[in-house]
Amino acid sequence: MAKTSIFDSRSDEKQWITQIKKIVQEEVKVDIEVPISIFRIPATLASFKPEAYMPRLLGFGPYHHFEPDLYKMERYKLAAASRLQKQFKTLEFDQLVDKLMKFEYTVRACYHKYLDVEGDTLMWIMSIDGLFLLALLQIFTNKDDSEAAHLVDSAGRKLSHDSILSDVMLLENQIPFFVFSKIISIQI
């Protein structure tokens, strides 16, 4: 028998109303002309072939950032992001987050699914993951292979470039592209 409702209980309905009110108050009323560009894969499709849709090593953006199996790499992401931040020599991490806050609703508008995280949490995710991905691009484009030594996991094992790139390319495992240009323009 097919399920006729998304709700399992009355409390689910109340939670839904609270979520809808928050979306209307904080996001829908904001006039932003940004197309949704990061979609959530339906569970039925993702369960059919999870390796094609779910990251295995690194979680980027709000959909996968806090998943326990992927969060093991958070210290690695922070270390790489911090190294790049030091190269910029202009702002501290928290200052970057503060500057990105004015783009919170534009970031939210890029995601297919409602993001049930506070604005500052979302901008910390964007800052960490954005700087990490920029650092990753710097490492991959660097002709000198000595920088590749930084691509190690929390156990000290060298990470496969293919594994990292396959996670970066996943539809759900992304951050909006404009965040990169904002980070660079804020830093320079």
Image (cartoon, rainbow, N blue to C red):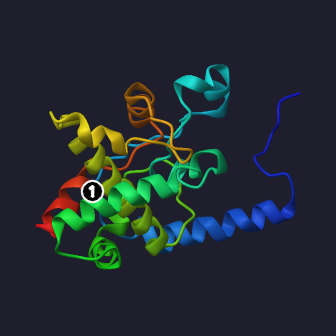
Residue 121 screen position, x and y as percent: 48, 70
Q: Quadrant of residue 79?
A: bottom left
**Left or right of residue 126: residue 141:** left
Tell me the quarter of the image containing the N terminus.
Answer: top right
Amino acid type at circle 1 is Val
SS class of the residue under badge 1?
A: helix
Percent across and percent down for residue 95 are: 29, 79
- Rendered view: 80 above or below 122: above
Q: Residue at x 52, y 49 (%)?
A: 73
Q: Which residue is mark 1?
A: 179
User: Residue 40: x percent and y percent?
Assistant: 52, 40
Q: Residue drawn 30% across and 57% down?
A: 131
Considering depth in this image, is 142 or 115 the residue closer to the camera?
142
Badge 1 crowding class, 10 Å Cα cut-off, few under 14, some 14 to 19, many 20 or more, is: many
Q: Residue furthest top?
A: 48
Of residues 156 and 73, the one drawn nearer to the viewer in this rendering: 156
> Does 79 sit left or right of 63 as displayed?
left
The structure residue drawn at horizontal position 30% and vertical position 44%, both measured from the top left corner, is 136
Q: Quadrant of the C terminus?
A: bottom left
- In x, y percent, where is residue 107? 36, 59
